[in-house]
């Protein structure tokens, strides 16, 4: 996974970071990231992972673009209305960075499909808007032993955490019950904030830099423009992850 001269120039500024360098960029180049959802959260996450040089992005969404999506789903434009979101996303991301291979799939993510869809990806990004599918992603991450980067939004508020199987609470530990399904408000800047944090977590994990949002739920309040953290712990009776051993250092 050696970098080409063009890649060295493209990623020059981020490789200047202490501890990043060419070795970190090469780790990004060989990485495969699964993004569930090509909407409000999936747009900024995938955009910033693509321009950072992640080697493969696998993006899955079953929906088509609607006019009401365009206040926040920045991968999609007026011309894309009625186009499948996954295909629209693939087109834009491939233009943003031709060095990143974008694989798009139009499919429903459920217990029957998720393991095959995730395949051999290194990490799952939860960019969904409903908890039943989030729980499916949670179980897949636990089964495969790979991280799940969770993000959710509501209006001008959002939250995110990084789940490491066996080391941190899983999504079911944090949210034992799904809230009732509803149409919720959202301003486009909110998924931009949360999605960028998710992309930051993915890059840090893949390169091996910094401190992840592990065992911490980061809560964003856009009304007051404040962040706060909540320490979270595993539920020993969690139906999804209680079977996983907790490492001695945890």
Image (spheres, rainbow, N blue to C red):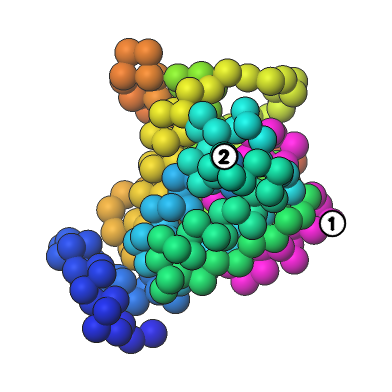
Q: Is residue 131 magenta?
A: yes
Q: Is residue 63 left or right of residue 224?
A: right
Viewer-proximal residue among 125 and 161: 125
Q: CA distance from mark 1 to mark 2?
A: 33 Å
The mark closer to the camera, 1 or 2, is: 2
Residue reaching furthest top?
224
Disc 1 secondary structure class: loop
At 74% from the left edge and 48% from the top edge, which residue is drawn? Answer: 62
Residue 164 shows in this picture: no
Give the quadrant of residue 184.
Answer: top right
In the image, residue 29 sits, relative to residue 191, either above or below, namely below
Mark 2 neighbour density, 10 Å: few (under 14) some (14–19) many (20 or more): few
Segment colored magenta: 110-134
Viewer-proximal residue among 213 and 120: 120
In the image, residue 63 sits, relative to residue 1, either above or below, namely above
| Residue 91 place in picture, x, y as percent | 55, 60
Viewer-proximal residue among 182 and 170: 182
In the image, residue 3 sits, relative to residue 83, either above or below, namely below
Residue reaching furthest right?
112
Count of numbered tags: 2
| Residue 52 place in picture, x, y as percent | 35, 61
Q: Is label 1 in contact with label 2 (beta carbons under 8 Å)?
A: no
Label whose residue precedes the other's in the sequence (1 or 2): 2
Viewer-proximal residue among 139 and 40: 40
Q: Is residue 108 left or right of residue 215?
A: right
At 48% from the left edge and 53% from the top edge, which residue is drawn? Answer: 46
Disc 2 secondary structure class: helix
Residue reaching furthest front?
79
Please give the label number shown on residue 112.
Answer: 1
Q: Which residue is mark 2?
A: 78
């Amino acid at each position: 996974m050696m970098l080409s001269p063009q890649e060295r120039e493209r990623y020059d500024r981020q490789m200047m970071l202490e501890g990043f360098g060419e070795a970190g960029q090469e780790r990004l180049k060989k990485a495969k990231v699964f993004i569930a959802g090509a909407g409000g959260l999936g747009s900024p996450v995938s955009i910033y992972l693509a321009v950072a040089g992640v080697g493969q992005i696998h993006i899955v969404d079953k929906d088509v673009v609607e006019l009401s999506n365009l206040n926040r789903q920045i991968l999609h434009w007026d011309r894309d209305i009625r186009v499948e979101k996954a295909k629209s996303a693939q087109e834009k991301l491939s233009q943003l960075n031709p060095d990143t291979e974008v694989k798009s799939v139009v499919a429903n993510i459920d217990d029957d499909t998720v393991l095959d869809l995730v395949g051999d990806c290194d990490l799952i990004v939860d960019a969904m808007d409903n908890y039943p599918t989030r729980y499916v992603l949670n179980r897949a991450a636990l089964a495969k032993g790979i991280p799940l980067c969770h993000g959710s939004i509501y209006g001008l508020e959002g939250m995110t955490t990084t789940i490491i199987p066996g080391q941190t609470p899983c999504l079911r530990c944090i949210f034992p019950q799904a809230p009732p399904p509803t149409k919720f408000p959202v301003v486009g800047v909110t998924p931009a904030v949360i999605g960028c944090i998710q992309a930051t977590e993915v890059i840090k994990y893949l390169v091996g830099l910094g401190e992840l949002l592990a065992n911490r739920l980061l809560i964003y309040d856009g009304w007051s423009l404040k962040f706060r953290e909540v320490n979270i712990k595993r539920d020993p009776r969690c139906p999804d992850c209680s079977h996983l051993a907790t490492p001695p250092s945890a």
